[in-house]
Image (tube, grey):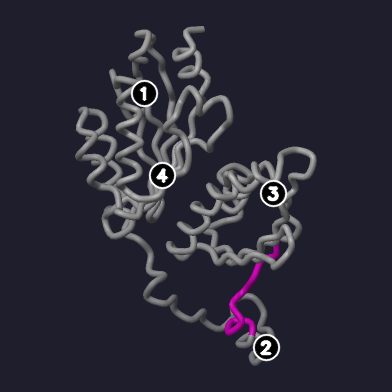
Amino acid sequence: MLFYVQMKWNYQGRISQDQLWDIEALEGDHGVAGIRAGFVQLFKVVSQHRIIAIVKADSLDDLDRNSMGWLPMREYLEFEQVWALRDYEGFLADVKAKFPPPGQQPAAPPPPPSAAAADPADTREIATAWFHNMNIGKSADALALLDPDVVWANVPTVPGVNDVIPWLGILRGADAVLKSFEVWGQHSKMIRFELLGDLMVDGDRAVGIAHEHSQCLANGNEYHLQVATFLTVRNRKITEWRVHWDSAPIVRAYRNL
């Protein structure tokens, strides 16, 4: 499903222009990752606070999740227009066929080779290996499953929270992810990491809920997190790794509250 999306930055009186650019820098990494993955085309309207996107989404639900929950700029984006689009060749075929009734429509053209569906078996195998390696403490083996150009969205940067948890943010590239893990290792020690229940797999996407039990090295406090993990697998590599979790338990542990 294709959509035309027109967005406006709605930040006046809420944050400064410089703060907007700091958040947009993170949003830009997210957007460039989508461009390179073939999910979106992005255009900046010249001399206006607007972005135009042509978005490919698997469902209305996914488009809504992305715009309302996943975008780093979601709090400051006003979605002025969201229009569903159809392929023009399909429309033209309907015109020439005098808009046939249901059940008599011409067959849709086959998708291009680049749009071939991912093998869910590959997705499940790689995602299972990811969680297994994390569970047994082989983080290096888990990181080896990442695509060199992977995008890791580990909770958007939040002023005040990043002072306590400095490894948050949206990162691009396996090297950046590795450095983030090194920063984490300077502050925390993993005690237990396990997948709760079964993986959910749909095409190239896998979703799992993990329980993390870790310890703050500075004061010995332990904390527990439930981490919703979203993995995108292409060519047997993880190209996107997105996590959602409540930062309150780790902030409480680190601040010794």
Identify the amino acid type marked 2. Val
Viewer-side label of 4, 2:
4
Residue 152 circle label: 4
Q: Write the residue at 21% across / 28% down.
A: 137
Q: Earlier in the sequence, mark 4 or mark 1?
A: 4
Circle 1: element type: strand
Q: Which residue is mark 3?
A: 77
Q: Write the residue at 49% across / 12% down.
A: 255
| Badge 1 vs badge 3, beta-carbon distance below 8 Å | no
What distance separates the C-alpha of mark 2 from that of mark 3? 37 Å
| Mark 2 neighbour class, 10 Å CA radius: few under 14, some 14 to 19, many 20 or more | few
Taking the magenta stretch, the answer to whether it contains residue 88 is yes
| Badge 4 vs badge 1, beta-carbon distance below 8 Å | no
Please say if 34 is above or below 107.
Answer: above
What distance separates the C-alpha of mark 4 from that of mark 2? 45 Å
Q: Which residue is mark 1?
A: 212
Rendered location of residue 11, percent (x, y) = 74, 44
Rendered location of residue 190, percent (x, y) = 29, 21
Viewer-side label of 2, 3:
3
Identify the amino acid type marked 1. Glu
What distance separates the C-alpha of mark 2 from that of mark 1? 56 Å
Q: Which residue is mark 2?
A: 95
Q: Earlier in the sequence, mark 3 or mark 4?
A: 3
Taking the magenta stretch, the answer to whether it contains residue 202 is no
Q: Write the residue at 37% across / 55% down.
A: 204
Q: Which residues are magenta?
A: 82-91
Identify the amino acid type marked 4. Trp
Circle 4: element type: strand
Viewer-side label of 2, 1:
1
Identify the amino acid type marked 3. Leu
Residue 106 vs residue 139, the one in the foreground: 139
Please say if 96 is above or below 91.
Answer: below
